[in-house]
Image (spheres, grey):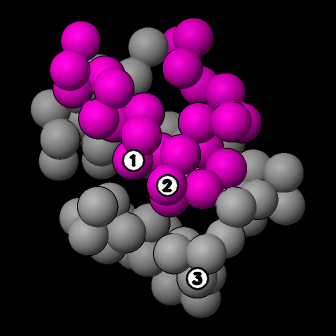
Amino acid sequence: MEELLSILWELHPDVDFETCDNLIDGKILDSIDIVTLVAEIGDAFGVEIPAEELTPENFNSAQALWHMICRLDEA
C-alpha cells in the first residue's frame, strides 16, 4: 500500500490519499492521471489492469485501488 501511496503522491502531492474517497467523483484524478496510474501500477506491482476494471469505483480511493491490485494479482 505504501508504494501505491507514493505513486499517488507523485501525481498530486497536495491530496490526502489515505482518507480521500472521491478521487474520480471529485475530479481530483483526470484521464491523464488514470493512464499514468495504470502504467505505474503495472510496473510497480506486475498487474495488468483490463479495460473493464477502469471504473470510478476502482479509482475513487487509494483503498479501492489497493483492493483492485490485490484482486488482479490473485487472478
Give the mark, 3 or 2, whose residue is nearer the N terminus. 3
**Taking the image as drawn, is residue 18 in sight?**
yes
Q: CA distance from mark 3 to mark 1?
A: 15 Å
- Local crowd at mark 2 within 10 Å, few (<14), some, or many (≥20)? some
Q: Is 65 on the left or on the right of 14, as rendered?
A: left
Q: Which secondary structure, mark 3? A: loop
User: What amino acid does circle 2 point to?
Assistant: Gln
- Local crowd at mark 3 within 10 Å, few (<14), some, or many (≥20)? few
Mark 3 or mark 2, which is nearer to you?
2
Residue at the image point whose x is 59% and y is 36% from the top: 58
Residue at the image point whose x is 60% and y is 56% from the top: 61
Q: Is 7 on the left or on the right of 27, as rendered?
A: left
Q: Which secondary structure, mark 2? A: helix
Residue at the image point whose x is 84% and y is 61% from the top: 26
Mark 1 sits on what residue?
66
Give the mark, 3 or 1, whose residue is nearer the N terminus. 3
- State the quadrant of the C terminus: top left
Residue 16 horizontal/vertical position (percent): 58, 82
**11, 23: nearer the viewer:** 23
User: What amino acid does circle 1 point to?
Assistant: Trp
Residue 19 horizontal/vertical position (percent): 61, 75
Segment colored magenta? 51-75
Mark 3 sits on what residue?
16
Dot 2 and dot 1 residues touching (CB under 8 Å): yes
Residue 59 horizontal/vertical position (percent): 60, 44
Q: Is 2 on the left or on the right of 67, as rendered?
A: left
Q: CA distance from mark 3 to mark 2?
A: 12 Å
**36, 61: nearer the viewer:** 61
Identify the disc placed on residue 46. none
Mark 2 sits on what residue?
63
- Residue, far right: 26
Magenta stretch: includes residue 67: yes
